[in-house]
């Protein structure tokens, strides 16, 4: 591994690291916030943040304003890139497929299958690396935005006991039912819709064995609300499964980090309470 950025922030450091990923077959970067408690040698819990379409590790660490809250609660925050990168990694001209648009799944179709295994990277390789190389105590939480909110919710639901808490901003809750998800799943997974369901929050809630409460914030002024996000489907699925959900509909807020930065403190407090 190599540290390529370090910036003092709220008594700790915001860093960016790069490493060779065996899962993805390419070099990957991730943002890492180390609070002062970690710098003093204390082992800290880790919040994993998954960003949305077109993003890299930079969007969250530069726009969300999360460092002050992570410092207050003594949390490490790890924010990976959103997809594999490099000249050998296949891409697509559209913003919603290929680089920056992994959908946090394991692709099964060519030309994507060799590199696009972000589910395994987030669930297995990245936490193993973080817990081996940094002062992490093994307690994990997961959150994300839009495509990353979809990733956070599905990963938590599919891995009971692995995360203490989960939350999302503006998540794609039913990718099998919306244009973004259908395009990506058809390319990455093929035409079998039964296979798609393993990466769909609404579908996974039907058989969830763990009742980890879902915290979701959604802006009512979001330009993607009706066509792509459909939080009403999440509410209905949670009600049908008796799964705990706190869905905050925020009047006037859009899909951007202006929205996230207003409420990221509440989400980090939620995770900190579960991680203690």
Image (cartoon, rainbow, N blue to C red):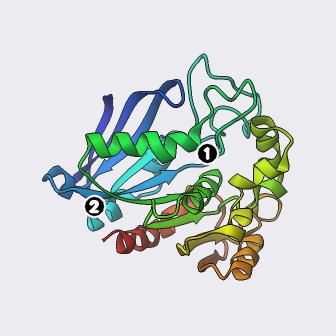
CA–CA distance in space, label 1 to label 2:
28 Å
Q: Residue at x 56, y 75 (%)?
A: 211
Residue beneath disc 1: 104
Q: Label 2, secondary structure: give it.
A: helix
Quarter holding the C terminus is bottom left
Which of 12/23 is in front?
Answer: 23
Q: Residue at x 79, y 35 (%)?
A: 187
Instruction: Give the percent coordinates (x, y) of residue 205.
Output: 68, 69
Kindly identify the residue that appears in the image at 77 percent across and 43 percent down. Answer: 185
Q: Is residue 114 above or below residue 163?
A: above
Above or below residue 67? Residue 32 is above
Question: In this orientation, which residue lies closer to the viewer: 53 or 110?
Answer: 110
Viewer-nearest residue: 176 or 77 = 176
Q: Position of residue 118 (x, y in %)?
A: 57, 40
* Residue wearing tag 2: 71
Location of the N terminus by quadrant is top left
Answer above or below: position of 39 versus 274.
Answer: above
Quadrant of res 219? bottom right
Instruction: Name the secondary structure under disc 1.
Output: loop
Residue appearing at x 76%, y 28% in the figure: 93
Q: Is residue 265 left or right of residue 102?
A: left
Q: Residue furthest left?
A: 40
Residue 42 lies, in percent from the top left, at 17, 56
145 lies above or below 236: above
């Amino acid at each position: 591994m190599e540290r390529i950025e370090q910036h003092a922030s709220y008594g700790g450091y915001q860093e960016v690291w790069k490493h060779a990923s065996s899962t993805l077959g390419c070099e990957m970067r991730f943002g890492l916030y180390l609070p002062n408690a970690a710098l003093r040698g204390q082992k800290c819990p880790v919040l994993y943040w998954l960003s949305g379409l077109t993003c890299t590790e930079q969007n969250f660490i530069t726009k969300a304003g999360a460092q002050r809250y992570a410092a207050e609660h003594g949390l490490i925050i790890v924010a990976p890139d959103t997809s594999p990168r490099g000249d050998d990694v296949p891409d697509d001209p559209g913003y919603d497929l290929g680089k920056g648009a992994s959908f946090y799944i394991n692709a099964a179709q060519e030309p994507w299958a060799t590199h696009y295994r972000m589910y395994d990277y987030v669930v297995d390789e990245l936490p193993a690396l973080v817990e081996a190389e940094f002062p992490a105590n093994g307690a994990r939480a997961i959150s994300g935005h839009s495509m990353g909110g979809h990733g956070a919710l599905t990963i938590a639901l599919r891995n009971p006991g692995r995360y203490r808490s989960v939350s999302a901003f503006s998540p794609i809750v039913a990718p099998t039912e919306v244009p973004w998800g259908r395009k990506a799943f058809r390319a990455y997974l093929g035409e079998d819709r039964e296979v798609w369901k393993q990466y769909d929050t609404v579908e996974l809630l039907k058989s969830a064995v763990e009742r980890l409460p879902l915290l979701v914030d959604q802006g009512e002024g979001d330009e993607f609300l009706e066509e792509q996000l459909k939080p009403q489907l999440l509410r209905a699925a949670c009600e049908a499964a008796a799964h705990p959900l706190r869905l905050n509909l925020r009047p006037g807020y859009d899909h951007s980090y202006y929205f996230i930065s207003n409420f990221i403190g509440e989400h980090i407090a939620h995770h900190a309470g579960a991680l203690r």
